[in-house]
Image (cartoon, rainbow, N blue to C red):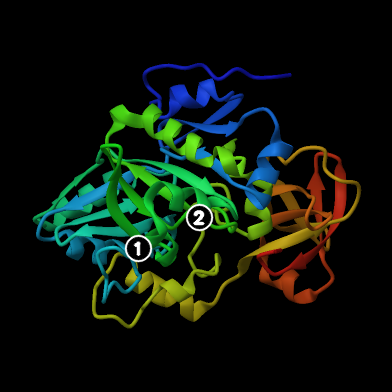
Amino acid sequence: MSLQLSLGARVRKSPFFDACCKAGLAAASVYNHMYMPTSYGDPVAEYERLVNGVAMWDVAVERQVALKGPDALALARILTPRNLDGLQIGQGKYVPICNYQGYLINDPVLLQIDDYEIWLSIADSDIGLWASAVAGTLGLDVTVFEPDVSPLAVQGPKAVEVVAALFGDWVRDLRYFGFRLTEIDGIPVVVARSGWSKQGGFELYLRDGRRGTDLWNIVAAAGAPFGIGPGSPNYIERVESGLISYGADTDVFTTPFEMGLGRFIDLTQPVEFIGKKALIALKEAGVRRRFVGLKIDGPAFERPSENRYDVLFNGANAGFVSAAAYSPRIGSNIAVAMVLVAAIEAGTGVDVITNDGVRHATIVDLPFC
């Protein structure tokens, strides 16, 4: 049974939506109140382009929350437990955001655009409302808003050749999460070395929503000699790479320590960021579960999992699988999962209740490759 996604004004379309439809968009989801492309009808080709060539993705759903004003940095410091000392214009940072109980509520990339403007490139949650409420409660001199910014990703081992052909060889020198404001054919963009894959690539932050089709066509033309084609954040590759998907891999009680994000948290800094006391207590208590990889026995899954799978250890619930698929590179069914530490340390593996029945799984570290 196939389901149809009804289009309407309540869920927004990206500036690249028409170009995506023309390129053969076959399926979409909803993310940050926008339609998010998920397939162009040939998942094998989309995976191959990403891991061996170059793909272009409409990721305008990766919305920006702008903090603008004299207190922009002060607000950013309050929102994240990451130490922002030494923050530089042109170099982004991955910044977990927690609530007052220390539970993870977003994991954006922070970009300092200028001395008085910071962007948070967010995952799927209304963090703009959170930031605005915090700023208003504290009386900070900062405006929180969603700017006219829509990322278009160019991902894969050949992505650097495409982006260098568009903007020049200076893009090769960008550090990871490094970025520069520039333009192409009169279209204002931010070129950032980033993207939701481990295959290398860039994100072009379109700064004029009227020019989405123009930018799409420019990238497609530059990428044609390299075999570029449309795609979307790839399900199989993200599992292989152990990339975190906020909301899919997390629940309302997930801590950054469970997700392996402790290295991004500075509990000794003098800033009284949100959740500091709770995070100190959580770290002292240690974690009961961890985000890990699984290699799942049995025949190859015919399609990626559509729901979470329960994980069992000695017959009792020990966590959940949030994404599972057959990996052609690894030659195995693989998954990412939140699993109790007791089950991990036992070293005997776990059982997973899949759509095809109960299968045994071996616990491994992430990433797979």
- Is 101 in front, or is 61? 61
Q: Is residue 199 left or right of residue 306?
A: left
- Asked if 355 appears above or below 50 in the picture, the reply is above
Residue depicted at x 37% and y 21%? 10
Direction bottom: furthest residue: 268
Q: Residue at x 42, y 16 (%)?
A: 8
Where is residue 173 drawn, in percent x and y? 41, 66
Q: Residues within 10 Å of mark 1 (few under 14, many from 20)?
A: many
Q: Nearer the viewer, mark 1 or mark 2?
A: 2
Q: Which residue is mark 1?
A: 92
What residue do we see at 40% from left, 26% from top?
Answer: 13
Q: Quadrant of the C terminus?
A: bottom right
Percent across and percent down for residue 146 are 26, 41
**In this view of the protein, can residue 251 be seen by the observer?**
no
Q: Residue furthest right?
A: 299
Would residue 146 be found to the left or right of residue 352 on screen?
Answer: left
- Using the rendered image of the protein, determine whether residue 201 is visible from the camera's viewpoint: yes
Q: Amino acid at mark 2?
A: Val
Vertical relation: 20 (above or below) 337? above
Mark 1: secondary structure: loop
Quarter assignment of residue 303: top right
Quadrant location, the N terminus: top right
> In the depicted view, which residue is nearer to us: 63 or 345?
63
Tell me if label 1 and label 2 are in contact, CB under 8 Å: no
**Direction from residue 133 to residue 158 in the image, left or right:** right
Q: Quadrant of residue 80?
A: bottom left
Q: Earlier in the sequence, mark 1 or mark 2?
A: 1
The residue to which callout 2 is attached is 160
